[in-house]
Image: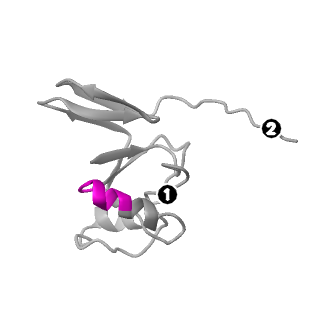
Amino acid sequence: GIIVLNLRSYAGGRDLWGPPSCCRDACCQTEESKYLAQARPSHDDGVLEVVTASDVFSMGVTLVKTNGLGGRAKRLGRFRELRITTKASLYMQIDGEPWLQPPATVHLKAFGQSTVLRNVA
């Protein structure tokens, strides 16, 4: 599965991007992959982080390992805009709300910023 992040918190506070680190992926040979290893995502930088899990089992392992154990998902890249074209129907989810998406081109990009209220008492 492909996961597009705009926050450093996913599924109950898991940080799927993980901390900046030395390259742990086998493909850390290019300048781009070295940049991804050291990248520090932020909610207000206008950049979307994209990670992947190969199957449900690996996603479960990733969620457990990112719960304070220093794990992370496989980093695919950081983008200001992302277009995903599907040729078949597939399931998508935004903020916990799933749906079956018919074939389409999905265009994603950061759009402004929302004000969040909090209790200061």
* Residue found at x 56% / y 42%: 44
Badge 1, how many Cα within 10 Å: few under 14, some, many 20+?
A: many
Q: Amino acid at mark 2?
A: Asn
Q: CA distance from mark 1 to mark 2?
A: 24 Å
Say which residue label 1 marks. Answer: 15
Residue 52 left/right relative to 88: right
Residue 6 left/right relative to 83: right
Badge 2, how many Cα within 10 Å: few under 14, some, many 20+?
A: few
Say which residue label 2 marks. Answer: 119
Label number found at residue 97: none
Quadrant occupied by the C terminus: top right
Q: Amino acid at mark 1?
A: Asp
| Residue 34 position in % (x across, y down) | 34, 68
| Residue 14 position in % (x across, y down) | 50, 56
Instruction: Say if the magenta span includes residue 58.
Output: yes
In this picture, is 83 found above or below 35?
above
Residue 84, picture quadrant: top left
How are the residues colored?
one colour
Q: Nearer the viewer, residue 45 or 64?
A: 64
Q: Which residues are magenta?
A: 53-60
Magenta span dominant secondary structure? helix
| Residue 36 position in % (x across, y down) | 37, 62
Which residue, as the protein is rendered here, is positioned at the far right? 121
* Residue found at x 22% / y 27%: 105
Q: Nearer the viewer, residue 53 or 110?
A: 53
In this picture, is 73 found above or below 96?
below
* Residue found at x 47% / y 64%: 66
* Label 1 with label 2: CB-CB less than 8 Å: no
- Secondary structure at numbered mark 1: loop
- Secondary structure at numbered mark 2: loop
Residue 55, picture quadrant: bottom left
